[in-house]
Amino acid sequence: MEITRKAKEELEARIEKIEGFIAKKGLGSTYLQKAQKTQRNLNLAIVLGGIILIAGIAIWMNGEDKEG
């Protein structure tokens, strides 16, 4: 059992290395890199928008308490 588990882990590691190599050097690699960069930028924009929204709501609620 131990041998088969180790063999399986080693094969999975090798497959991941091959997939990484193909992603960097294979067909469509530039498209993949652009898509990853776009996704990262979109995620950052969503997080930043959420922070600004929460800060705006907090300021609005704080101002509303002072009026009443």
Image (spheres, rainbow, N blue to C red):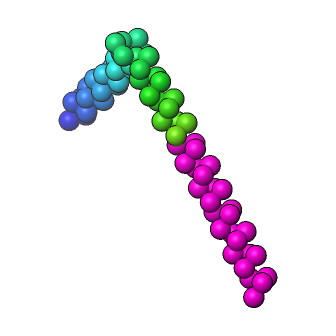
**Where in the figure is residue 63, as x and y percent of width and height?**
76, 76
Q: In which quarter of the image is residue 35?
A: top left
Q: Main secondary structure of the magenta part?
A: helix
- Name the quadrant containing residue 57: bottom right
Nearest the eye: 23 or 10: 23
Place of residue 13 in the rendered image (x, y in percent of width and height, measured from the top left): 35, 25
Q: Relative to residue 55, is residue 66 drawn left or right?
A: right
Q: Which residue lies furthest to the bottom in this view?
A: 68
Residue 65 appears in the picture as rendered: yes
At 59% from the left edge and 55% from the top edge, which residue is drawn? 50
Task: Give the farthest residue toward the front.
Answer: 67
The stretch in magenta equals 43-68
Q: In which quadrant will I find the N terminus?
A: top left
Say whether residue 10 is visible. Answer: no
| Residue at image coords 26%, 26% | 7
Name the residue located 34 percent from the left edge and 12 percent from the top edge: 27
Which residue is at a point 52% across and 36% down the rendered structure image? 40
Q: In this view, does 31 lie above or below 39?
A: above
Q: Where is residue 66 in the image (x, y as percent from the top left)?
A: 79, 82
- Count of marks overlaid on the render: 0
Is 34 on the left-hand or right-hand side of 65? left
Q: Is residue 66 magenta?
A: yes
For the residue pair 68 and 20, the one nearer the viewer reads as 68
Compared with 25, 64 (above or below) is: below
Q: Position of residue 47 (x, y in %)?
A: 58, 49
Displayed quadrant of residue 16: top left
Q: In which quarter of the image is the C terminus?
A: bottom right
Q: Is residue 18 magenta?
A: no
